[in-house]
Amino acid sequence: MAKLFYDEIPTEQTVTAYINRENSSAKPQDIYLHLLMRKITSDFETVLEDFFGQHGITTSRFIILNMLFHNEAGMTPTETAKKVGVTNATISAILSGLKDSGLIQSTQNAGDSRSYRVTLSPAGTELLKKIYPVYHDNISKLWSHFDTEEKTQIGNMLTRFSQVMGVLGNKF
């Protein structure tokens, strides 16, 4: 399925007009903040897809490679799927692509011959070592526009937001 992104979001005043026309009891500021958060996340996703695409991978593949980089013992496909919140079928497709690209390798699980663990291949490790410095520099450049106090405030608000989302779960 294609991902759709917000190119622009309406002003808070326009959101107020929309809510009045929709006969909604929603608070305009709440809807505006929701749209702003969606815009920011879609902008991030677009930038990251472009960045990782320059290195021949997708954001999804980077997430898996990054997890394996920090888990040298490797992971089973089921463990990996649970960590990233996808089905076993989805993770199988991603892992298959990474294996075909030579970025991961699989070994039979010593304790259970029916399962296997995936680890980074030397090529996967080298790719990440090439990506990490540029990736981290770009993140630092983004956050350099905020002072320490602003970053602390943003971190606190986003942590609280994440906790509220955790409480709501799938009850949106």
Image (cartoon, grey):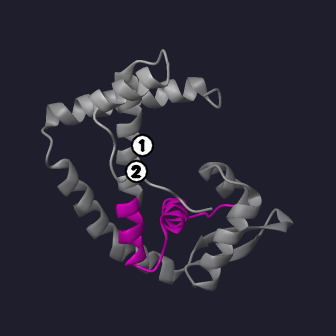
x and y percent of residue 143 in the render? 20, 48
In the image, residue 51 lies in the stretch drawn in magenta:
yes
Viewer-closest of 37 and 57: 37
Q: Element type at marker 1?
A: helix
Q: Element type at marker 2?
A: loop
Q: Is residue 158 toward the left or the right of residue 56 in the image?
A: left
x and y percent of residue 146 in the render? 15, 41
Given the image, on which type of amino acid does mark 1 rest?
Arg
The magenta stretch is 46-75
x and y percent of residue 160 in the render? 41, 25
- Residue drawn at (58%, 84%), measured in percent from left and top? 101
- Residue drawn at (34%, 77%), measured in percent from left and top? 130
Above or below 165: residue 70: below
Viewer-closest of 76 and 64: 64
Viewer-closest of 16 and 66: 16
Above or below 125: residue 114: above
Q: Which is the main secondary structure of the residues drawn in magenta? A: helix
Task: Work out which quarter of the rendered image holds the N terminus and state it.
Answer: bottom right
x and y percent of residue 138 in the render? 24, 61
Task: Work out which quarter of the rendered image holds the C terminus and state it.
Answer: top right
- The residue where tag 1 is placed is 38
Q: Is residue 45 toward the left or the right of residue 14 in the image?
A: right
Above or below 68: residue 83: above
- Residue drawn at (63%, 80%), measured in percent from left and top? 99
Given the image, on which type of amino acid does mark 2 rest?
Tyr
Viewer-closest of 118 and 41: 41
- The residue where tag 2 is placed is 6
Which residue is outermost to the front?
21
Mark 2 is surrounded, within 10 Å at the Cα level, by few (under 14), some (14 to 19) or many (20 or more) other residues, namely few
